[in-house]
Every structure is written in structure tokens, then in C-alpha cells.
Amino acid sequence: MIKAGIVGGTGYTGVELLRLLAQHPNIQLVTITSRKEAGMAVADMFPSLRGAVDIKFESPDTAPLKQCDVVFFATPNGVAMQQTRELLDAGVRVIDLAADFRIKDVAEWEKWYGMTHACPELVAEAVYGLPEMNREAIRSARLVANPGCYPTAVQLGFMPLLEAGLVDPAYLVADAKSGVSGAGRKAEVHTLFPEAADNFKAYGVAGHRHLPEISQGLRLMSGRQVGLTFVPHLTPLIRGIHATLYARLSGAADLQELYETRYRSEPFVDVLPSGSHPETRSVRSANLCRIAVHRPQGGDTVVVLSVIDNLVKGAAGQAVQNCNLMFGFPETMGLTQLPVMP
Amino acid sequence: MIKAGIVGGTGYTGVELLRLLAQHPNIQLVTITSRKEAGMAVADMFPSLRGAVDIKFESPDTAPLKQCDVVFFATPNGVAMQQTRELLDAGVRVIDLAADFRIKDVAEWEKWYGMTHACPELVAEAVYGLPEMNREAIRSARLVANPGCYPTAVQLGFMPLLEAGLVDPAYLVADAKSGVSGAGRKAEVHTLFPEAADNFKAYGVAGHRHLPEISQGLRLMSGRQVGLTFVPHLTPLIRGIHATLYARLSGAADLQELYETRYRSEPFVDVLPSGSHPETRSVRSANLCRIAVHRPQGGDTVVVLSVIDNLVKGAAGQAVQNCNLMFGFPETMGLTQLPVMP
Amino acid sequence: MIKAGIVGGTGYTGVELLRLLAQHPNIQLVTITSRKEAGMAVADMFPSLRGAVDIKFESPDTAPLKQCDVVFFATPNGVAMQQTRELLDAGVRVIDLAADFRIKDVAEWEKWYGMTHACPELVAEAVYGLPEMNREAIRSARLVANPGCYPTAVQLGFMPLLEAGLVDPAYLVADAKSGVSGAGRKAEVHTLFPEAADNFKAYGVAGHRHLPEISQGLRLMSGRQVGLTFVPHLTPLIRGIHATLYARLSGAADLQELYETRYRSEPFVDVLPSGSHPETRSVRSANLCRIAVHRPQGGDTVVVLSVIDNLVKGAAGQAVQNCNLMFGFPETMGLTQLPVMP
Amino acid sequence: MIKAGIVGGTGYTGVELLRLLAQHPNIQLVTITSRKEAGMAVADMFPSLRGAVDIKFESPDTAPLKQCDVVFFATPNGVAMQQTRELLDAGVRVIDLAADFRIKDVAEWEKWYGMTHACPELVAEAVYGLPEMNREAIRSARLVANPGCYPTAVQLGFMPLLEAGLVDPAYLVADAKSGVSGAGRKAEVHTLFPEAADNFKAYGVAGHRHLPEISQGLRLMSGRQVGLTFVPHLTPLIRGIHATLYARLSGAADLQELYETRYRSEPFVDVLPSGSHPETRSVRSANLCRIAVHRPQGGDTVVVLSVIDNLVKGAAGQAVQNCNLMFGFPETMGLTQLPVMP
């Protein structure tokens, strides 16, 4: 049984982490911080956790984070980088669910995130927490940068093609659709129910922060520069990401077999039978990515469909998966709940 | 480990039962029938169950139902009563999630359900499967009539008041709102997404089949005739029932304490603190009923708010709870997953 | 052609008023104010109005409100009362869509709204703008208090019964369900899409500000004190209110005929045939109230179902209807668009 | 005032046509047919039309279709082609909202629609009813093939680029998302609320019937063969299509100016300012297509965002627009209602 802390647990990523940790047999949540809600019982804010989580939010200044074995940051970007050094020095391992340690090129990070990085030296050390790509490095990592939600769906979708060098990396398209929980639990007008329900729109076409993160990953897979057009869309779902990926084939292969082989031993990636169309609800509330690969009309454009729950495989679930790897637990421990459908 | 079968597993109640049984440590699902889908893998129809359920639908004529310890009927009304006698005679215990055995007055049942009952003698034997009311009888039952979704929410909401004789039973109002999954997984126009989304309506005001079931239960609680006005509404939720109950106080009591005391040792009923408003999502996908009791403006009208997930505490979850009782398992076994929120 | 101004046009009531006025043949919108958005084109904030509304938000300090024939306040409570005296003195007629002038008992108003009234003397003059109740007084009013959304649905539903003295006014129940736009276009967490979608809850059971407004109206209809239990619920609709009303009959009558007779000449109240269940979408985007009256099981409880679009008959549409009356236009002018369904 | 008939008015396209025609000053609906609902009042099936439409559904065998000036077919594919010859011979003009006359290559049509065409000679005569492409031909047409919903959004989005020869027509991607009303008002499981709500999926990736229709149009615009990958998605919207289009630039141009110039005099196409992201709700219930054009990161991939209401500009509204052209009415007559938002 290890001791875990959560910094910033009042957002959707935080409450999902609470749900998963409360059901994890080997992790005990000992503290959760919120500057604003310090003193409030977690279950008063989130009644769905009544009877399962009985601690209170604590001030970040007094919470016993250094007594933890692992601390999860479920904070806005720019918070984890302020506190990670101190925690690592105290022997605590850190999993950041925000973006502070995801991009290796610090200048690039600073450009997209509009702030100066507080600890560039840790960026080099941090391991990008996509287990299907970096499993061994994660096992021994002190600091894991948990991937973004779009980057998880898009990278898992493109990975077999790029690793095999089967598509032209210069012209990749990722048309991605996200549920509204991806925008966070912040008081904003554009994500109010009457704004987001019965409505569909693209956003950030000129440039979204997940673009450099995805490009970095795709570059590593293909070993070459990539040209990616990434268009995210806001969709009237609570949870779920559906990435529709387009690439031009530059070689011949049995795509179905390629995907099945690549992911055969992955516990959380499921390649659907040929001709399938994965639904976001088929992974709702579960730590899963389901993928289908198509070659419409037998042409040379490949279409990959990749779905995840943005709060689970796209955030809290993947963080727990990384934690399992870091502490030598079975990778699926605490992550075996089935998707809730309908 | 006991062996379980499901008759009629292609509806929402059936797929929810599949989800719950697949995660139950002491129940093994050995067969599931569907006349129409015989031969199809369950996971092909419900991809959310890929990797967790690997059996196929079987014809009801050949499925080894008599080799089961328990058979769940997740069928339309009128099916279970045709097959229950034979199963009981073979030593199989039966839990009917439909309405065949819920109403003790067979003539009343036949009036509301528009058919002749096939085995009236079993109606008398059947135990109404509301554990909070009939726990001991359920333990030794061969045949359990699993309550309807509305009846579960309404009866649990009124129970403390009626048992204590604190309200006038002649004037009870149950204004109930249900998610669309309550209407079943049937191809019908009125529950299509474009009909039911962004829309709200009452239905069945002149008389709904759950009215006699609820009235029977309330009568048993109060020991008197009851006058109930029950108005169900179709709500753009996937899952969830919210019952708003109104009664006139005929005596004095600390209502909050009354409810807390009545449900203190119930594992699946949660009385919220005074002044609360339970949300349906706080029980989503979990076997829970959350209740709040109010006395607005200090007047003599009591308002009770009662929420459940219609597919779990209102159907499949309660069936598993009953099964646990019938086989001497811990009552909460396999039912401890936390609600999924948001 | 009269000149109209809108104060505070960035909320849902404001944008709906913009939509309706842009299609009204006899009203010209000459100014709209927003302190925060001054200088921004209305159509930049609301692209649905591109090509139809080409003015900009103006500062309330410089907007030519006094040059208008009528000014609509689509502001938070407490704003209109600060500016109405000055406008009336300048010969401008005022329609307040907020609550400042709805409640005749100023002390009662101050208790529920938590502020001191700035012009109690105008409260007495103000006409409550429910045309089905006060048509003649509205025609000559300088100041109209446009009813709240819940109060419109509930009062129109109870009116025939109370006017006829057919029910016991001491025990009335209004179980009301509102779409989320009723909560306004404010940045708040509880109305975010991931909070309000697939969720249902009651709120304000202890006391909601629309309670005294409704009670005042019901008292006027019945000529007696009334005892009303009012429970509002938040529903995952964008628009729509469904009020389910319960009362105990104290006399005999043909209820269907009573309602049809009472509303026969009302252009915006539609009594459905006996046995009907009105849907909120049947009035979506239209200035209509549809009503059905039931007497379940032939008992002595009457159930009335009343639906409106909270932004139209419950706000902006009713304001235009009042404006038509005040300026001698046909009552239906500019309000004849059909409901949008599905 | 011309006389109009509708064949098959019980679907979403039909009821939308009813809404629009009831508000059209120069068109009188004299008959509507439905074999199944003959004798039923239209307003009984669609209460939103109470007071506005007072005719009954008639049997197609007896309805006075030949006395009409124009007949709209809002029928499943394959119906209009059986009756069009007879109507044309009687001097009636025909607008088919289904697909019978959209594809000039009859063999291609027969392959995709799986039936033998009943009147191939009329296919040649039929005019494809996309006014922005074929306005003059529509004016004098006897028979108009009203475009499909996806084809309308995709063709209007690509048109300026292809006409100008600025992109490589061999590699076009149309990633399109549709509301569920696009699937029609048919009793089917996959479009039930509990299936389609809070869910997102692609479908028909291997080949959708709108693919040949779109390809035909794009080929005409570009004067060259086109290679189009078209992926439709089912989205939890009632109404709305959002097409996200990708193409590779082969020449230099000011794209914003190109689009603004091309559509400057189009009454129903609105090019948004540079950098915009059109929302589906900004055209809800209105006969409009709003478009934005982007060139992300200054690269050579152009991204076009195109939104319509699938039932209006994608079906019934465009049919009325075509009818206006055919009978010499102002093109916008009866189509000026503003979008309903929120």
C-alpha cells in the first residue's frame, strides 16, 4: 500500500482520479489540496464520492505531500513545475497531469504556454507517460509527464503506421472531437450547457497547445519531421474523444494485421475487427483506447478511428496506469472497471 | 461461485446485468439467450463488453438454463411467467426483472398488463425484491420479483413517513422523472434522439402500470389504503430517476432524524444532510438511492427527493443485490463501483 | 414604427429579444447597452444575428435611451429600479424583464431579493404583464413588470381552476422543470455542460424567489390566501418549462370545457384535447403556452400540465406581446413564427 | 399564390417543410399524403403545428396532386421516381428531396442505391438544386433534385477553391458531422436517445451514398477527376451539420477574399471573418450556410469549416429556395426567419 497525494483536486481530472484511487487496492489517498476549498469535505463537493472518500481538502501549504510516495498534480498548467523539485528532493515521485513536462523543447513549450519554465532541467529528466511508447522508462521514472487527452488518442492511432514507415509523414490530418469535460471545470460562458448543448464547432484551428505535443510524439515514432494538421472540435458529450486520422499510404501492408500485431499485448488498447466504427461510449469511464483502421474504396488514403474517455485513458486513468508501472504493481490494477453503457 | 443465466439479454436491463455480473467475484455467467440474436457474440452487439464477456447469445430452446443456480429474466412482461415453473421445478432460483410477479392481486395485474397470468399460484410465492422492505424473505426465496424502477425510487422515498404514520396516506403525490433508457431498447419513434432530446413531457397521467405496484407497497408500509397520484415524465437523460414526493404531515417529528435512523444500516440508501438536493448523476451507474427530505417554509407539506439509476438500483443492480441475499453472499458483493461523475 | 432600446442585452433574455425585435415590423431597435461590451458589434457576440442586427453595444451612460418610445430591461434584478424613474419622466415607457416591479408588497420583495427597493412608489404603478390576466391595464401602462418564467407557466395553468373556485387553494403543488437557459448566461460551474447534461435535480426547495410572485398571482385569481408548495428542477434542456400542477377538487365541473372556455380567445394559450401530454418542444422558440388538464383515475386530484419556452412566453416573447398591447399594435404582431421541431 | 402538395410528410424533412410552407406568403399547401396516416390531422401528429396547419394526411391514391403547381417529395429514396413522370405530364413541377434524380450516371446511382431506376430519361432532365451552382437552370426546371445534406455543406465549402483551381483535387478530405435528425424519423435502435446521446462515432467509412453525389459536384466545379475521402459521423445534435474540409494548396491566393468574393451576392451563404469558427447553432432552423476558411500555421493545407442546418439549407429550406426560383418569387421569400439561439 503506497501513500498518494493529489494537488488540485477540484477539477474533472481531479474528481476522476479520486474515483479511481478510491477503488485501487494498493494506493491510499492521504491528502488532497485545494487552496480555495481548504477545510471542505471532498464528499460535500462531490456527493458521488459519499461513503468512499472521507478526507477534506487541505491547504497546499500544510498538506503532508512530502510524506507521500507519489503526488499527482491535477492542476492548471504552470503549477506543477513550481513544486516538483522540492518533492523529488524529498524522495516523492511525481505524476503531472498538466502540460508542464510534456514538451522537451523548452523554448517551444514557453511559446505555446506563454510562461517561463520554472525548472527546465527537470523537463529533460521527465518521462512522457504514454506506456504503449515508453513503458520501460516509466517504470524507473521519478517524474512522469502524463499525456494530454487529444495527444493520447491521436498518437495511439498513428503509432503503428508511423513506426512501420507506411505513410507520408509530411501530410497527416487529425480531426479530433472532444467532450466538454475536456475544457475543465471552470466557470466560463462558452461551456455552459445552453452554449454547448445541441451545438458543434471547431476551435483553435490556427494552433492548439496539443499540436506541438502530438508532433513531438509522431516525430519520435517516424524518425522524421512530420507535417500535422490538427483540428479540435467541441462536441456535446460529457466525456469522450474521437480522433479521425487521415494519412497517405506510401507502402503496402495488411493494415488490420499491422494494428493487431502492434497492440496485441497492450492491456488498454483494443483493435476492433476490420470494418468497425468505435463509439466513444464503448470506452466511457474505462481506461481504454479502441481503434479501427480503414482504407476507403481501396484508395491510398488510410483512415484511423481512435476513441478514448478523455478523463480516463486521456488523463486520470493513464496516470494510475503510470503509477502502477512506477511502483511495480500489475499494470491493470484498479483499472478493470468495465465501460458504462448506455 | 454460482452459475447464472440471463434470458433476454439484448435490452438495457440485460446489458447492465452483463456489466455487473462480469465484475462479480462469485457469479459466473454461463448462458444468455436471445431468440433473435442466437449465435451472435455478446461483445459484437455490445462492444463495451469486449474482453470481458466472451459468450454468445443462445437460443432459448437449447440454452442450459436448468444447469444454472439462478436465472435472471430481463425480458418483456409476460415471458418469465411462461418459464418459471419449469425452472423452479429443476431447482433453479429465479429473479424476474419484469413485472410478472410483482402484483399480488392477479386480477389487478391482468387488468393493467392486458394478459392472462400463466401461473397465478407462483405470484403468491414470489417475494417482492425490495431488500429494504423484505430482506429476510428474499434470503430464502426461490422466486424474486425485482421491483420496477419508479416503484423503487418512490417506495424508498415514502417508506419512513408511511411506516411511522406521519402523513395522510389518502393524498400522496409522486412526480417522477425518468431517463429514456427506462423506455427500453426498442425501435420506436417517440424515444429517438431527435424526439427525446431537448424535450420534456409527462406521459401516462391517466394511469401507468407502475401505479398499482407502488400503491401495493405503500399500502403495506402504512397498513392503510393509500390515495396516490403518480405522474411520470420522460426526461432527456440516458439514465436516472428523480422522484419528487409530496405528502401532508399529520404528526410531528424530526424528519431528518427519522430518515437517517430508518436507513442507517442500509448499504445502498444514503440520506443526505438536511437542505440537500440529490442529483441523478450522483448515483449514475451505481446501486444507490440517495434521498433528501424537506419541509418547505416550515409548512405541513413534506417534500422528499429520491434519486436512483433506473438501470442499477432500479433494475440490474437490485437484481444482483437480491441474488447476493438469496445465495448468502455479502449484500454488497460486486456492487461497490463508485458512481461515474461527470 | 416605434423606437426601442434594450438595457443589458448580453444574456439569453437579451439575445432572444434581439431575435424577436429584428423580425418585428413595427419596432425599430435603436440602441442596446452593455457596460462591459460597449463598442462590440452585437453580431460579433451573437453570430446567429449576422445580417439582421447591425448595431453595436453602447455604454449605458451614453446610449440614447431617452429618445426611445420603449425601453426593455434585460438586466439582473435591481438594475431597472435605478433607471426607470428617469426614463418615465422623459416619456419613455418601460418593460422590465427582471423582477424589480413584480411584487406589490415591497417588504416581501426586499426580503426575497435581499436589497432595498430604489423606487417603491413605482411598484404600485407597475402593471404585472400577464396579458391573460391584465390585458386592459397593460394597454395603458407606462411601466410593465414582465412575469418570471416559472410564474407564467404556473399561473396560466392554475388560473381557470382558481378563478372558478373549483380547488382548495390551501394545498396547491407546482412541480416545475426548467431548461438551463433559465439560469442565465453567467459564468458559473453548476450550469456547465458537464454538470447539467445527463443530470436532473431539484433546487431551492426551501424557497425560490418565484414563490412569492406566483403566490401573489394565485391569490388574486382565487380571492383567497393560497398555500403553495413550489419545487423547481434543473433539467437538461436548453429551453423549456414544464409545470406539473396538483390540486384537490372542491367542486364539480367539466374541466376540459372550463379550460377551453377560459382560453378560447387567447392567441397564445392553447388548450390541448382531453388526454393530451404537451411537450416542451411543441412551443420551442414560440410565444405559446400549451396546457392539458387531467383527472387521473377519476379521483379528486386534478393534474394540469403547462408548457412554455422560458425565453419566449416566459420572457422576451411576452415582453413583445406586452409592448404590442402598450402601443396599440395587433397583439400577435412579430410573434407568429412557428415552433421549431424537432 | 401557388398550390403545393407534399408526398410523404411524416418524416423530419416533411415536418420542416410544413413549418416553412405554413409561413410562406405565396405558397398554399393543399394536400399532403401518407399511406399509413391517411385521415389523421397533421396537427395531431405534430402538435407544434396546431393552429397553423389544419389539413389531414391523405392517401396517395386520392390526393389531388395533379391539381398542384408543385409537388415536393419528402419520401424515402425510390418513391419519387415512380410518380414523377405522371406529374410532369400533368404540368406539375416536381422537387424531390430524396436522391432519385441527383446522380447523372444512372449505373452509378443504381449501384449505390441498390435498385433499378424507374425513369432514367428524367435523370438527364433533372436539375441539381444547388442554387449557388445552378441558379439559372433551376429557374426553368420542371424537375429539381434537391441536394443531400452532407453534399450541400461539403460542396459549398469546397466550391471557391475548386472553381479557382487552387487545390489538388486528387486529395480532398471531408470530415463531416451530422445531427441525428439526418438519419430520419424511423423507428430504429441505433438512433434511440440512449444510443445516440453522449456518444460519438463515425459510420459508413467504407462508402456512404453521399460520396458519389459530392464527387459529381466537385468534379463539375474543378473540371477534373477528384479523389475524395468522405467520413461522416453521428453527433449528439438534433440538427446541424459541420463539415471540416482539408485540401492541399497548389497555388497562391488570398483565401479570405476568394470566399468573400465568390459568395458576396449569395443570400444564404455567409463567409465569416478571418479566424472564425462557425457553430452549428448559428444556423439552427435557418436557411443558411456559414463558412470560414483557414490556413493553419501558414502551411499549404487549407481547412474550411462549413455549417448548415441539415433540415433547412440541407433539405426543406433549400427546397423552398428552389421553389422560389422556379416560380419567379424573390429567392428569400418565406426563408427570412432568424436562427434560434440558444
Image (cartoon, coloured by chain):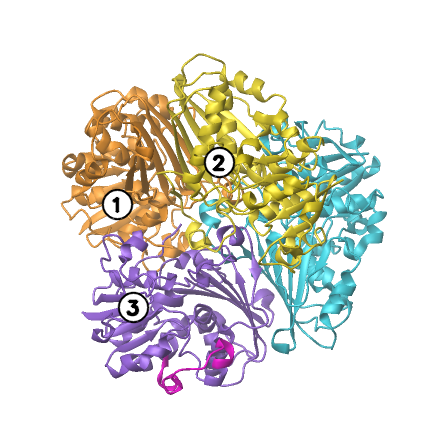
Chain colours: A cyan, B yellow, C orange, D purple
| Nearest to viewer (mark 3 / mark 2) | 2
Q: How crowded is mark 3: few (under 14 residues within 10 Å), some or many (20 or more)?
A: many
Residue D49 is left or right of residue B43, and the answer is left
Residue under the point 28% across and 73% down: D71
Q: Quadrant of residue D61?
A: bottom left
The answer to which of D14 and D217 lies nearer the viewer is D14
Q: Is residue C69 visible?
A: no
Q: Name the residue under label 2.
A: B150
* Magenta residues, start to end: D110-128
Gap in angstroms between the C-alphas marked 3 and 2: 42 Å
Q: Is residue D311 visible?
A: yes
**Residue type marked 3:** Ile
Q: Residues within 10 Å of mark 2 (few under 14, many from 20)?
A: many
Q: Is mark 3 on a helix, strand or loop?
A: strand
The answer to whether residue A63 is above or below residue B78 is: above
Q: Name the residue under label 1.
A: C273
Q: Name the residue under label 3.
A: D6
Quadrant of image for the N terminus of chain D: bottom left
Q: How many marks?
A: 3
| Nearest to viewer (mark 1 / mark 3) | 1
Q: Is mark 1 on a helix, strand or loop?
A: loop
Chain of the residue on which disc 2 is drawn: B
The answer to whether residue B144 is above or below residue C280 is: above
Residue D127 is left or right of residue A140, and the answer is left
